[in-house]
Amino acid sequence: MPALRTFLPWIAFAVIATKGDWRYGAPAALLLALWLLAADRRAGRGAGELVMEISGAAFFAALTAFSWTVPHSPLTPYGPALAMGWLAVTAWGSLLAGRPFTTGIARTMTPPELWGDPRFRRANTVITAVWAASFTATGAALAVLLAAAPHATAAVVSVKLLGFALPAAYTVHRRRAAARRAVVGAGAGESGEAAGAGEGLPQAGPARVPAA
């Protein structure tokens, strides 16, 4: 799933920094973010399609510097909540800018002729809003949990995973629903391209159904 690749640095940070020490999780996430960003740029993806990737690299660069400069900061235990908060700000910011971050992911699996379709843009706006809401709720939940029970590692990890799993499940659900609509539309005489345009579906068969 393309969205999973986008969030690999964040997932790596969530796993490595669970014990509350950023000094190793942040550099590891930064290296992974830079490697993925370089690979995407070599593949020809523009900066406008890499909103979350660029934001992640910037966040982990700043966090790496901060974690080694102020290793005993009172903010350190709240690293997971700060990470989710940054993701939320990035996602909501992309919506306010009129460039939902999931659009860049959807374009990697969608024919260029569908990128300008209003339904394609609307679908990505909704999906990005779901991710943004999940990041916001997860960040708030982590802040409360880390303040009340900072050593509840299992609970912290579970909340982190849910913060990614729930919007990912919604994205997959939306993708499958769009595929079904495309099949029904094609059976009713509507072209597969027209039936699936709203979710960024390609004209050809189900093997190329994209994740928006």
Image (tube, rainbow, N blue to C red):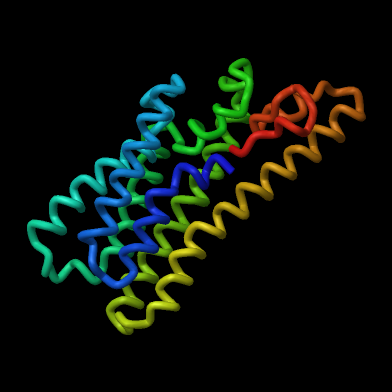
Q: Is residue 55 above or below residue 8?
A: above
The quadrant in which the N terminus is found is top right
Furthest-left residue in this view = 69
- Classify residue 195 as left or right of residue 5: right
Q: How many marks can you see?
A: 0
Spot occupied by residue 122 in the image (x, y as percentages of width and height): 57, 34
- Classify residue 177 as left or right of residue 32: right
3 or 37: which is nearer to us? 37
Which residue is pictured at 50% across the width and 57% down the height? 164
Q: Is residue 92 above or below residue 108?
A: below
Tell me the quarter of the picture where residue 23 sits. Answer: bottom left
The quadrant in which the C terminus is found is top right
Spot occupied by residue 52 in the image (x, y as percentages of width and height): 38, 40
Which residue is pictured at 73% across the width and 39% down the height? 178
Q: Is residue 203 above or below residue 94?
A: above
83 or 154: which is nearer to us? 154
- Classify residue 180 as left or right of residue 198: right
Tell me the quarter of the picture where residue 121 sits. Answer: top right
Spot occupied by residue 8 in the image (x, y as percentages of width and height): 44, 49
Which residue is pictured at 55% across the width and 43% down the height? 126
Which residue is pictured at 52% across the width and 43% down the height? 3
- Classify residue 208 as left or right of residue 104: right
Spot occupied by residue 116 in the image (x, y as percentages of width and height): 57, 20
Furthest-top residue in this view = 113
